[in-house]
Image (cartoon, rainbow, N blue to C red):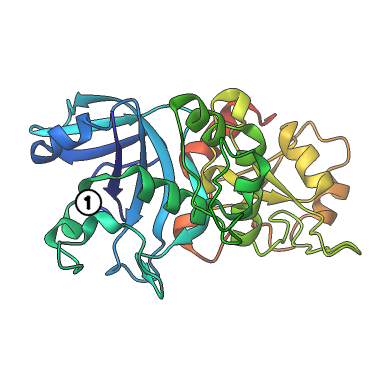
Amino acid sequence: MGYGVFIHRSDSIYDDSPAEQYQFPAQYLGRVKGCIGDWIIYYEPRKVADTRGYFAVAKVQQVIPDAAAQGMFLALIEPGTYLDFANPVPFSSADGVAERGVLNVEGRISGRAQSAVRPLSASDFGKIVTLGLGQATSLLPRVDTVATDAGLSEDQAPFVFEGSRERVQFLTSRIVRDRVFRQIVLRAYDERCAITGLKLINGGGRAEVAAAHIRPVEADGPDVINNGIALSGTAHWMFDRGLISLSDDLEILISRQVNDPDGVRGIVNRSGQAIGPKRFSERPHPHFLRWHREQCFKQ
């Protein structure tokens, strides 16, 4: 087992669904198999407009041949492990490249940086995850402390996973995942309720809107931005109880079982359309919207 980097772009020609599967050709089979049972980081190339850089983490469960495409394989992602980064990490910054493994012996970027699948060192993995999850890392205790002759260092060392239990504890922690999910969803929706269009901030500067899963975690819904929507209290209550839903093009659907349809129409966005994220790749995915209409919405 070992860490890895999987290159993925939102306009990929491959049959990728980052929270579920990653399609790749046979030339990368050995490298991907080396990641089975361990964690990988998704990376979007710098050539992509408005690139997200290193943008998510997930765990590879198994690798199988792709029955629909000869010579292709699928890395299946373990359910419940995918997590978007609260802070996408750039390939390089003033401190240098985030992934030291792409440098040659002379300290220059090598051809390894072009590989769609490549191994990742434990130190690089820890550093990128720490930067990507930001303040969420402080929610769980570190597994050790580091002492030096000069005393305690003021610089925070990268989070280092000492063993599989600590790694799983951190990356699957519901506390961490809920906090990161709220960050990415509220940022995508500019802290505005998608149904009512209201953007309310309380006296403490906190947005009065929740990050709701379209397909709930309890029903195997992943912590991916496309399965999230920002909702204010009343809208959240109605959405969870199937009194409102959304079409694939984000038209607001009102259940015939609503006892006060005029009242509901009075609080939803006047256009009848939910307000989605500006970035198209962050909009609710039809796969999750269809699940909500079929499994939750009261027709």
The image quadrant that residue 298 belongs to is: top right
Q: In which quarter of the image is residue 193?
A: bottom right
Residue 213 is left or right of residue 202, and the answer is left
Whether residue 86 is situated above or below residue 96 in the rendered picture: above
> What residue sits 57% from the left and 28% below the top?
294
Residue 228: where, in percent of width, then height?
59, 45
Query: Which quadrant is the N terminus positioned in?
Result: top left
Image side of residue 294 versus residue 112, left or right: right
Rendering coords of residue 100 (x, y %):
29, 58
Q: How many labels does the image show?
A: 1
Where in the figure is residue 73, as x and y percent of width and height? 18, 32
Residue 8, above or below 93 = above
User: Is 170 positioned to the left or the right of 25 in the image?
Assistant: right
**Nearer to the camera, 75 or 297:** 75
Residue beneath disc 1:
13
- Crowding at dot 1, Cα within 10 Å, few <14 / some 14-19 / many 20+, comes out as few
Q: Which residue lies furthest to the front in this view?
A: 149
> Residue at (51%, 53%) from the top-left corner?
157
**Quadrant location of the C terminus in the rendered image:** top right
Near-viewer residue (167 or 75): 167
